[in-house]
Amino acid sequence: MWLAVPFLFSAAVFGLMGSAGLVSASFASVPLSPVVSGAGVAVAAAVSGGVRWGRRWQRVWVRWPYLGGVLAGGVLVGAVEVPALVAAVVGVPVLLGLVFQCLVRGDEGAAASDCR
C-alpha cells in the first residue's frame, strides 16, 4: 500500500485541479506538475516511517531509492498536459477513496481507544 501513496496523492490533487478547471471553465488541461509529484513523495516519505519493513536494510535500500525514482519520474513528466476532464474522472474517485480510508481508519482508532 505504501508504494502507491505518492501516486494516489498526486492523482487526488490532479483530480481537484481538473474539477476546478471544469467548474470555472478557465482551463481545459492540467499540467502534470513536479510540485505535486514532490508533495506526493513528501507524503510517502512521512508515511514510510510507519511501514513495517521485513529487514532493516530495506528501510535504506528500498525506501529512499524508490522515493527518489518517483520524484525523478514526476520531474520528467512535468511538461505533459492532461485534459481536465480526464484528470477529474480519474482523480476525484481516488480522492473519495482516500477520504473514505481516512474515515474508516479514524473509526477503528476511536473504537479501540474506547475499550478499556
Image (cartoon, rainbow, N blue to C red):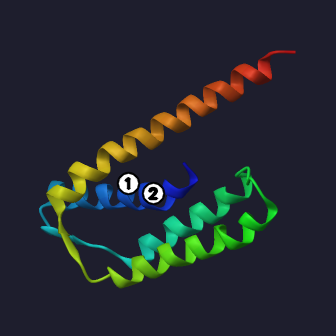
Q: Residue at x 62, y 25 (%)?
A: 107
Amino acid tagged 2: Phe
The secondary structure type at the circle numbered 1 is: helix
The residue beneath circle 2 is 9
Residue 115: percent from the left, percent from the top?
A: 81, 15
Checking the image for residue 12, the label placed there is 1
The secondary structure type at the circle numbered 2 is: helix
In the displayed structure, 107 sits above or below 91; it is above
**Residues at marks 1 and 2, CA–CA distance in whole angstroms:** 5 Å
In the image, 40 versus 25, the foreground residue is 40
Residue 23: percent from the left, percent from the top?
A: 17, 54
In the image, 68 versus 12, the foreground residue is 68
Residue 16: name its quadrant: bottom left
Quadrant position of the C terminus in the picture:
top right
Residue 66: name its quadrant: bottom right
The answer to whether the residue labelled 1 contacts the one labelled 2, judged by CB atoms less than 8 Å apart, is yes
Relative to residue 26, is residue 13 drawn left or right?
right
